[in-house]
Image: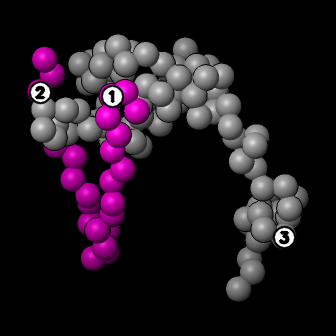
Amino acid sequence: MPTEQKVTGEKNSDQQTSVVRVGISEAAKLFGVSPRTVRRAVSNGELRYIVVRNRYQIHFESLVNWSQKQTTVQKKRDQQGIGQWIEKWKIKNPKYSPRTPDGGVNSKS
């Protein structure tokens, strides 16, 4: 069984950052992989986590980084996980989009 790795919010200029954590089954559903794949990544030390009430709570940012590094996970994420919804989530109206058509960021103040 892997040892517990502590994840704490780091302070940046007197500001506490919040950390998003998800369970093993939630991570598996979000990224379109089996819970066993997520557990294997935890045991290999590829994911940051804490243990709360004998359950793994995985650092979401480490999940995203892991899914981008692993080609098979990346494909499953895009076909069966949250990646399949990206096109539907894109903002079509440029008035409300943070990006301009040339790829820059709108600077409305």
The answer to whether residue 12 is above or below residue 55 is below
Q: Position of residue 101 (x, y in %)?
A: 88, 58
Q: Secondary structure at mark 2?
A: loop
Residue 5 among magenta residues = yes
What's the CA distance linking mark 1 and mark 2? 16 Å
What's the CA distance linking mark 3 and mark 2? 49 Å
What's the CA distance linking mark 3 and mark 1? 38 Å
Of residues 65 and 52, the one nearer the viewer is: 52
Image disc number at residue 3: 2
Q: Which residue is mark 3?
A: 95
- The reply, left or right, for residue 89 in relation to residue 16 is right
- The reply, left or right, for residue 92 in relation to residue 49 is right
Q: Secondary structure at mark 3?
A: loop
Residue, x 26% and y 38% (percent of image)? 57
Q: Position of residue 38 (x, y in %)?
A: 36, 21
- Placement of the C terminus among the 4 image quadrants: bottom right
Image disc number at residue 24: 1
Residue 20 among magenta residues = yes
